[in-house]
Image (cartoon, rainbow, N blue to C red):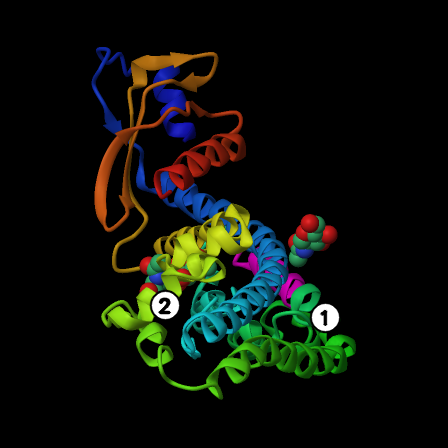
Amino acid sequence: MWKQMLCMLSVCAIAHGVLVPLDSFSQDMLVKLFRQVLLEKVAVEWNVTVEQSNVLKTKNTECNGKIDAKINACKSETQSTCGQSPTFTDYLNLINPYTYMKGPLDDIGHSIAGVGNLIADGGKQFVSSMNGLVSSTGKVFTDAFSGLKDGLNKLGGVFGSGGNTVLGGLGSVGSGIKDGLSTVGSGIKDGFTTVTDALGSVGQSIGSALGSLFRGKREITAEARRCMERCASCQPLLLEKEQMVRSICGDEAVELNKTVSKRVQQISAIYNATIDTVHPIVTKIEYDPASMSNMKFTTVFLTAYVKGSYVRYQSTASYAMMDIPGTVREVALEYWNKMA
Ligand SMILES: *[C@@H]1O[C@H](CO)[C@@H](O)[C@H](O)[C@H]1NC(C)=O
Ligand SMILES: *[C@@H]1O[C@H](CO)[C@@H](O)[C@H](O)[C@H]1NC(C)=O
Ligand SMILES: *[C@@H]1O[C@H](CO)[C@@H](O)[C@H](O)[C@H]1NC(C)=O
């Protein structure tokens, strides 16, 4: 970058609007910093997402209970109204959020060893953030974090004097995690099996057809539907899944679920793009040397890998030569939003 600056101050009188590529040394340095900032944000966003997932998990459990109650009410109403006992076996399919966090966290676990040479601080900050995340949330989502934990374990002493340093604090949390696993594990299982058991054992008259509602294809038999339609308490159960959940548990359960799964998707896509060596995240940075104002180049173009293809765009950020970290943060945030 100093080369550019000198160039600016001396000879390189270039006409406005002519873009020149950043020299490769400066570009490499900026891209490493760019990756570092993105990964730090990945860690922070994971933290937020985990907290949201905790809330969602509670909501899902409550919601399962409400659906359970609704099903029981419908069952007894159909029984007395038309002598039918629907089984609803497949009804309860509210996915616990940890199930869709697990894959992306495993991916980080698998790839985390390769992160180091791609980013400016060698991955230290990211690794220690993920460590912090594992130890602070491990108790709640043990299974979801197991792949990540393995990956961090394999890093061993890379960033410290020994494996224990990398996983600092985990040792003492270990037993807590174990307890958490069995407690949470059986809690989840109970949440799901209670309802299934309650309904699964009841007759099959309507149930086998009804159960397919969430799987999409099969229809409720006309007879079953007629009986349910006559019963007020069965109405919500006749809706398609999302509407049913809205109707029984409220919009919030559905919206939070969407928020969490969308975030997981975005964070994971950005993580992938950041460590992608086949399609490096940024291949070109260009600026207009004549756009200098207050030690900033105001016209900057990036060529970056966005959602599966290279896109060249003008950045809203200025290339501030006296504040490279600030510049990179702005550019990284802009990229983050492009990946939404
Ligand atoms: C996650 O966020 C909470 C606050 O929401 C904070 O107390 C905790 O330190 C964060 N954990 C990490 C690993 O950043
Ligand atoms: C929650 O989101 C997941 C993943 O997108 C989806 O499969 C599931 O059906 C959603 N659950 C509810 C209750 O909306
Ligand atoms: C990220 O990469 C992993 C491993 O290559 C892949 O399984 C996953 O689907 C990718 N996720 C996204 C959101 O692109």
Residue under the image location 50 percent in, 45 percent down = 37
**In the depicted view, which residue is nearer to us: 108 or 240?**
240
Residue bounds of the magenta highlight: 122-134
Assess mark 1: CB under 8 A from ligand 1? Answer: no
Q: Nearer the viewer, mark 1 or mark 2?
A: 2
SS state under label 2:
helix
**In the depicted view, which residue is nearer to us: 173 or 169?**
173
Q: Position of residue 100 (x, y in %)?
A: 45, 66
| Disc 1 residue crowd, few under 14, some 14–19, many 20+, Cα 10 Å | some
Tell me the quadrant of the picture where the C terminus can be found: top left
Instruction: First in sequence, mark 1 or 2: give its number.
Output: 1
User: Looking at the image, in which quadrant does ligand 3 appear?
Assistant: bottom left
Q: Position of residue 185 (x, y in %)?
A: 62, 80
Query: Which amino acid type is marked by label 1?
Result: Gly
- Residue 180 lies in quadrant: bottom right
Magenta region includes residue 207: no
Q: From what the image shows, is residue 307 above or below residue 127?
A: above
Q: Position of residue 70 (x, y in %)?
A: 54, 64
Tell me the quadrant of the picture where the N terminus can be found: top left
Report the predominant secondary structure element of the magenta stretch. helix
**In the depicted view, which residue is nearer to us: 97 or 25?**
97
Query: Which amino acid type is marked by label 2?
Result: Cys
Residue under the image location 43 percent in, 57 percent down = 235
Q: Is residue 320 visible?
A: yes
Residue linked to disc 2: 227
SS state under label 1:
loop
**In the depicted view, which residue is nearer to us: 133 or 286?**
133
Magenta region includes residue 123: yes
Report whether 150 appears left or right of 261.
Answer: right
Q: Position of residue 143 (x, y in %)?
A: 56, 77
Residue linked to disc 1: 168
Residue under the image location 67 percent in, 62 percent down = 132
